[in-house]
Image (cartoon, rainbow, N blue to C red):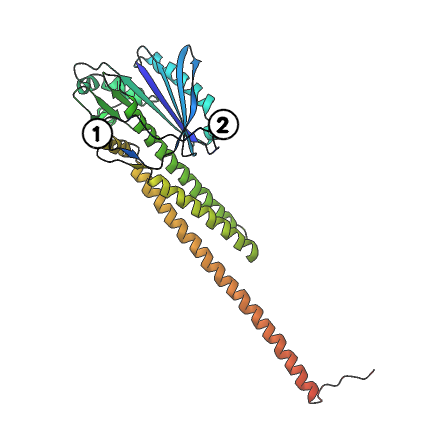
Amino acid sequence: MDICYLIAFPDIESKIAPKKESIQGLKDAPYFQPVDIDVISLGDETVLIEGHAVAVVRHQYDERVQMVEARFSLKNPFDPTALQERAKIENALQSKFIPVEHRQSGLYEEYTILLVDDAKPTPDKWIDKNALEISRFIRSQRDSFDKNEISEILVSRTRYSATELTLVDWEGAVIIAPSGDYDSDIVLLKIGNYQLLRYRVLDHSIEKLLDKINESFFEKKRRPRATRGLIRQIAEHKLEVMLNFERTEQTLLLIGDWYTAKLYEAIQSEFYLKDWKESVRSKLDNLESIVQTIKDNLSISWENLMDQIQLFLWMVMLLGYLYLYLLDAGWITIPAN
């Protein structure tokens, strides 16, 4: 059987390409239109890892994320030794393509897909028969599962026909297609991983911004002039995060194709994309409130400073008038030289 291993990681380096591509290859989707996903091909290659020829295709999405698709074959992917062999191949691919900084921070996505062209007597019965093995394949870090866990892993199934089915879990998937038409479903799984990583990157950016605010305004005391400049920087960063959020939110529009829409709804559910979206939106709202509160306090502090300066100048002026009055009344004399 073939394995499709996806890797997605942040990549904002501008690439030179003849022209930007669009998402293609979707199953029976003449009315499907992906919105605002610019795709740049970064080439393909075949690499030899652990004695296996691995076909690798790389793309950049929206000049934000690099998506790596690697395909290789294993005779029996359910065998314990094959699971170890697969882990070695996947780790080697991570080391080869994911920058060290992202591997260390964990800010990347990986996703394994089993491609099956022969599932008899029916896809559902084949999955039920191999339930434990499929669960181990998808959740490769686990050896034992209870019935409830297996049921949870295998519950999300989308059927295109009596012989074609896609099983989606948040850690991996199984695509059953006797005709070998896997690409359309892989495209949607790529988009799902892309959106998930974008939300994670936004969440990470907001956390860093909150840490900067905490360090600047609550752990250190700064002069008003420096603080106003920092507020400007924070506001600009906040605007950039908000724009990225809006772009991520409007990445995909599904029109007219029942299967594509249904499968992507399953992907959204299994990847918790709506939860991530609400979490990021909530943090953005909190960030907006915090920044506004700081602006208000800074404005009040600035006004208080101006009031104190104005009071001091009035006192100087009053003392000057009093001095002139006393001098004119003769109460103060200036000795002649």
> Residue 196 appears at what percent x and percent y?
35, 34
Residue 314 x/y as whole percent: 59, 75
**Residue closer to the observer: 305 or 51:** 51
Q: Badge 2, how many Cα within 10 Å: few under 14, some, many 20+?
A: few
Left or right of residue 163: residue 300: right
Q: Quadrant of the C terminus?
A: bottom right
Instruction: Report the residue at 34% width, 42% height from top.
Output: 279
Of 45 and 192, the residue lying toward us: 45
Amino acid type, callout 1: Tyr
Looking at the rendered structure, the secondary structure element under dot 1 is: helix
**Would residue 216 be seen by someone viewing this image from the given angle?**
yes
Determine the secondary structure under disc 2: helix
- Name the residue rendered at 64%, 79% in the picture: 319
In the rendered image, the vertical position of residue 87 relative to residue 316, given as above or below:
above
The answer to whether 214 appears left or right of 158 in the picture is: right
Look at 52% across and 62% down and name the residue there. 302
Q: Residue at x 24, y 16 (%)?
A: 179
- Marks 2 and 1 sit apart, C-alpha to C-alpha, by 38 Å
Disc 2 + disc 1, Cβ < 8 Å: no
Looking at marks 2 and 1 on the same chain, the residue that comes earlier in the sequence is marked by 2
Q: Is residue 73 above or below residue 323?
A: above
In this picture, residue 220 sits left or right of residue 241: right
Instruction: Estimate the x, y position of residue 293 in percent, counting from the top left.
Output: 43, 56
Residue with the mark numbered 2: 100
Residue 259 is tagged as 1
* Label 1 Cα neighbours within 10 Å, binned few <14 / some 14-19 / many ≥20: some
